[in-house]
Image (spheres, rainbow, N blue to C red):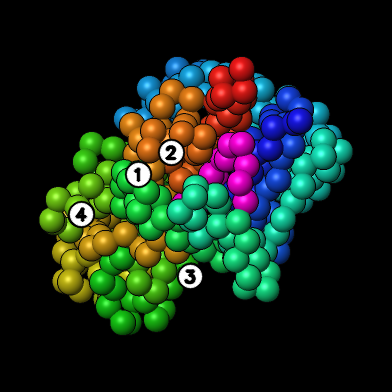
Amino acid sequence: MRPTVAVVGGGPAGLMAAEVLATAGVAVTVYERMPTVGRKLQVAGRGGLNLTHSEPLDAFLDRYGSARAHLAPAIERFGPDALRAWSEGLGEATFVGSSGRVFPEGFRATTLLRAWLRRLDDLGVELRTRHTWQGWTDGGALAFTDRDGATITVAADASVLALGGASWPRTGSDGAWVAPLQATGVDVRPLRPANSGFLVAWSEVFHERFAGTPVKDVSVRHGGMVARGDLMITRDGIEGGPIYALSSRLRSTIDSGTAALLEVDLFPNTTAAALAARIDRRRPKDSLTTGLTRAGLAPVTVGLLREATANQPPTSPRALAAVLRTLPLTLTAPQPIARAISTAGGVALDAVDEHAMLRARPGTFVAGEMLDWEAPTGGYLLQAAFSTGVAAADGVLAYLDTVRS
Ligand SMILES: Cc1cc2nc3c(=O)[nH]c(=O)nc-3n(C[C@H](O)[C@H](O)[C@H](O)COP(=O)(O)OP(=O)(O)OC[C@H]3O[C@@H](n4cnc5c(N)ncnc54)[C@H](O)[C@@H]3O)c2cc1C
């Protein structure tokens, strides 16, 4: 008889595990709580679907920080080139964007996902949607509530848990798996927002006027890290690529008990002297705001200057230029995890063995963002989800070989 494997969670990690297992001849059923699979992948597709990154593998692996050693075997086994070839095999050739990021030519997830689901269907993978995993029965079977709220139990030869993190819960990933895993003795690190925005106590005047306004091409600095790009002012704080890039460091500072001071260079392409000369052209009877606007500063830039100086900006052009190049913003907390791009924390890496199997539950494997790793945006998140999906499937195949021989 063919071995049976239950894959729980129909995101990139779970579906990739399903593909590898079904290709090896295993009877696979994917259980997914939402009406359709791959919802977070679809959301990622709205931003162009940055599948992976083209930088050399050593630099690529460094993006996973302290999880590098754990993830390296999975990413070396199924890395950026393999992922690109896989995408091409599904009819979505990829290209390298100017930043080195890799995208499918279609620039979205829908076509890729549709072709992938066709392939999985051809391989005989069964999809059971609207099935929410609740944990294990006393006898060790997987317990689900189905679309009618009834409890069903599933006893498979092995299972892969690929339930994602807790960001964007409307896509189905809500982190509710933490409780059953902890109850079974698995060490789960607290789920935290990663690649997230941060809260700033803006004045009412500022957020009323500028929430939703971008601040173009700035450089931000914190704790020795620097990132460049566009910021977005939100009602209660600040977000955008450069903030996400620093978010892990900012979060650590806040965790240590202090607010995080972010230094923003609003004019990274200009010297302080050139900026001072530009500001100095304002007419003597201009108010500060009129003068700075006349000097070509965007209203949001002037607003930020006022926020950062408690509405007491210096008056001399040289001092003004200095503040605009090193604008201090106090970030008090990360935005809630529901708004983050990804999740830090999760199943502790030493809670799984080198085959991605839970030490506390032999026969149960873990893949994707529910593991305790984090990485910046740039394709590193999806790459790790796909790679750990392959690794978990490899682990299952090795396990099935052992238990069935
Ligand atoms: C706005 C946004 C943009 C992004 N853009 C990119 C990008 O361009 N590049 C990139 O690399 N990454 C991006 N990411 C991150 C990337 O999408 C995730 O890292 C990736 O989807 C994680 O894959 P996963 O399979 O581990 O989890 P998920 O994709 O979250 O899949 C987990 C699945 O498990 C299901 N599930 C959860 N709990 C249960 C349960 N109890 N029972 C049954 N099913 C359950 C969920 O419904 C979900 O379908 C983005 C994320 C967001 C939110």
Does the image show residue 186?
yes
Relative to 229, is 350 on the left or the right? left
Between discs 2 and 3, the one toward the N terminus: 3
- Quickly name the residue at label 2: 361
**Neighbourhood count class around disc 2 (C-alpha, 10 Å): few under 14, some 14–19, many 20 upward:** some
- Quickly name the residue at label 1: 186
Location of the N terminus (image quadrant): top right
Distance (Cα) linking label 4 and label 2? 35 Å
- The image position of residue 236, as x and y in percent, is 35, 72
Residues tagged 3 and 4 counted as in contact (Cβ below 8 A): no
Badge nearest the viewer, 4 or 1: 1
Chief secondary structure of the magenta span? loop
Q: Residue 3 appears in which quarter of the rendering?
A: top right
Residue at the image position 46 percent from the left and 34 percent from the top: 362
Q: Amino acid at mark 1?
A: Val
- Magenta span of residues: 154-166
**Neighbourhood count class around disc 1 (C-alpha, 10 Å): few under 14, some 14–19, many 20 upward:** many
Residues tagged 1 and 2 counted as in contact (Cβ below 8 A): yes
In the drawing, what numbered circle is on residue 254? 4
Badge nearest the viewer, 2 or 3: 2
Q: Nearer the viewer, residue 302 or 189?
A: 189
Between discs 4 and 1, the one toward the N terminus: 1
- Quickly name the residue at label 3: 212
Q: Residue 13 appears in which quarter of the rendering?
A: top right
Q: Amino acid at mark 2?
A: Arg
